[in-house]
Image: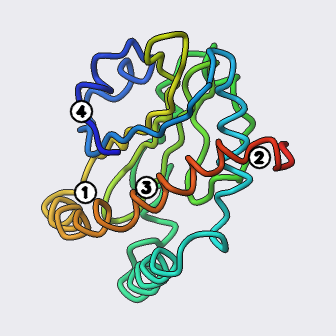
Amino acid sequence: MKIARTAHSDQPWRIHEFTGDFRTEDVWSFHTPGAGPDDFPVILAATRTAGGSAKEPRIVRFLFAVRSKLGALLGWDKPKTSLGKRVQPLHDRLPGDLRETVDGSDTSDAPFTPVYLLHNESVRELANKTCHAVMHLGWVPTGAGEYELRMAILVKPNGLFGRVYMALIAPFRYLIVYPAITRQWERAWRNRGLQPTR
């Protein structure tokens, strides 16, 4: 479910220390009934197990295939536009205590690259010719001792081109991609006991 940007900005996340030059593009919540304060690793494992591209709805796979083809045709995803090339990785801004929380060999959420992982935050980033984007997953108390997963997408568009691109894809994100992710992740939580975790 799409929620207000303040649902992200009002939380005392560490991510706020490093993303003052990013804008909060989208914030979504995912219902995880019965979840407790220690279940953040459980939901992360469940979403990764359930989140492979082959398991996404056909329309989502089609949209990402179109985006991939356009990116290849127009040079949006060339190595020179990526992290460490066109933009400085967010990971480079971190203090040592956060840098040591992820293993650089983790590619489970490709094309996103791990930034840091805490007991209640998971942060990954990507960059291409359109923008530098950060995906923040947070574990938030909702009352009565229960918790829910929230996702915020933080973006630094690459000039006018990046701003136009983000505006053009907004309807697809809101009407197709995020609702599909919501169904997939909430189902992953419900079925977590049936899935192998890693």
Disc 2, SS: loop
Q: Residue at x 70, y 32 (%)?
A: 102
Disc 3, SS: strand
Q: Residues within 10 Å of mark 2 (few under 14, many from 20)?
A: few
Q: Which residue type does callout 4 highlight?
A: Arg
Return the residue at label 1: 158
The reply to whether the C-beta atoms of the residues labelled 4 and 1 are less than 8 Å apart is no
Spatial CA distance of label 2 from label 4 is 32 Å
Spatial CA distance of label 4 from label 1 is 21 Å
Return the residue at label 4: 5
Q: Position of residue 128 (x, y in %)?
A: 41, 62
Q: Residue at x 34, y 29 (%)?
A: 19
Lower position in the chain sequence, tag 1 or tag 2: 2
Disc 4, SS: loop
Lower position in the chain sequence, tag 4 or tag 3: 4
Quarter of the picture containing the N terminus is top left
Q: Which residue type does callout 1 highlight?
A: Asn
Q: Position of residue 4 (x, y in %)?
A: 22, 33
Q: Position of residue 32 (x, y in %)?
A: 56, 34
Q: Position of residue 31 (x, y in %)?
A: 49, 37
Q: Residue at x 46, y 65 (%)?
A: 80
Disc assigned to residue 127? 3
Spatial CA distance of label 3 from label 2 is 18 Å
Spatial CA distance of label 1 from label 2 is 27 Å
Q: Residues within 10 Å of mark 1 (few under 14, many from 20)?
A: some
Lower position in the chain sequence, tag 2 or tag 4: 4
**As rendered, which of 195 and 113 lies closer to the eye?**
195
Q: Residue at x 56, y 47 (%)?
A: 186
Return the residue at label 2: 105
